[in-house]
Image (tube, helix red, strand yellow):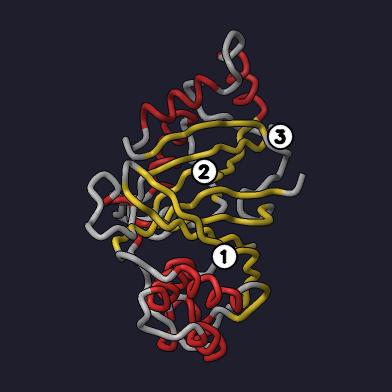
Amino acid sequence: MTDEPIQGNQAQKTLAMKVAYRGEPFSGFARQPEQLTVQGELEHALEVLFRRPVETTCAGRTDAGVHARAQVVSFDVFDGELAEMDERDARRTRFASLRRSLNAITHENVSVREIWQAEDGFSARFDATAREYRYFLSVGDVEPVLMRDLSWHVGPLDVGAMQRASRCLIGEQDFKSFCRASSAVGKPTCRNLMEVSFSDEELFGEPMLVVKVVGSSFLHSMVRTIVGTLVDVGRGRRPERWVEEALAACDRTAAGECAPAQGLVFWSVSYDG
């Protein structure tokens, strides 16, 4: 990069990157004063490389402790900066040097997997049409070892009951009962949930029930509260109809617990075209 910030009226271009991270050491994705965050790490690295502040936008702001497999982050660069990157990568994959530099500077639990030039003005957040999360439930008789930090150990579950109970959640609904109460004050709480599905997997020799949740967007702690509520049904602590009743109540106290953060992974983002 150049020694001085690029000034003047140069046009801006938009870059996007696919980022993976382990959520355990971070206070969530979004930057916070005096806190270690994924956005803070990325923006610090970009500022070091471009020698100017660089603001980023993500597809979905994850909570503290939540992981990501393919978070999408967008940011703008100037024409001159883009030309310099292309010159550096003349004999390599485009943006290879930028990706390598970002991975060298950011926290060891953050990995920039891919960088590409997006359409001018592209927003990782506002252009997204669907977000997919996956929650990993350990359903064996004993606690997992290798998956301990990436799952919630709950023991055997009645998956059929959980599937039936989840059907009422599909479609455009008011999910006020399934988000952090303080985050819903004075804000709209209707969201479009496209899919809730369940699959049995074996990971590192451990039996897992993977809950896939897809929606246009999500409220604060919404996926974790849905999972925690369905686990109560799967354990036989609550009847299947309870989920529908909790949804209709529009009251956070009507639903179940918020599942632990370590079992949740921001899996992927979809964009039209």
Q: Secondary structure at mark 3?
A: loop
- In this rendering, is residue 122 above or below 158? above
Query: Which of the pair 73/11 is nearer the observer?
Result: 73
Q: First in sequence, mark 2 or 1: give its number.
A: 2
Q: First in sequence, mark 3 or 2: give its number.
A: 3
Farthest right residue in view: 273
Instruction: Determine the CA span between mark 3 and mark 2.
Output: 29 Å
In the rendered structure, find residue 196 and report the number of the disc placed on it.
Answer: 1
In the rendered structure, find residue 101 and report the number of the disc placed on it.
Answer: none
Q: Residue at x 32, y 41 (%)?
A: 204
In the rendered structure, find residue 11 and report the number of the disc placed on it.
Answer: 3
Q: Residue at x 32, y 60 (%)?
A: 152
Eye-nearest disc, 3 or 1: 1
**Percent x, y for residue 123?**
65, 49
- In this rendering, is residue 4 above or below 214? above
Q: Secondary structure at mark 1?
A: strand
Query: Which of the pair 63/130 is nearer the observer?
Result: 130
Q: First in sequence, mark 3 or 1: give its number.
A: 3
Instruction: Determine the CA span between mark 3 and mark 1.
Output: 43 Å
Q: Secondary structure at mark 2?
A: strand
Q: Is residue 17 visible?
A: yes
Q: Residue at x 23, y 56 (%)?
A: 143
Q: Residue at x 52, y 30 (%)?
A: 5
- The residue tagged 2 is 70
- Disc 1 marks a residue whose amino acid type is Val
Q: Is residue 141 left or right of residue 4?
A: left
Query: Which of the pair 267/83 is nearer the observer?
Result: 267
Q: Residues within 10 Å of mark 2 (few under 14, many from 20)?
A: many
**Is the residue under label 1 in contact with that under label 2 (CB below 8 Å)?**
no
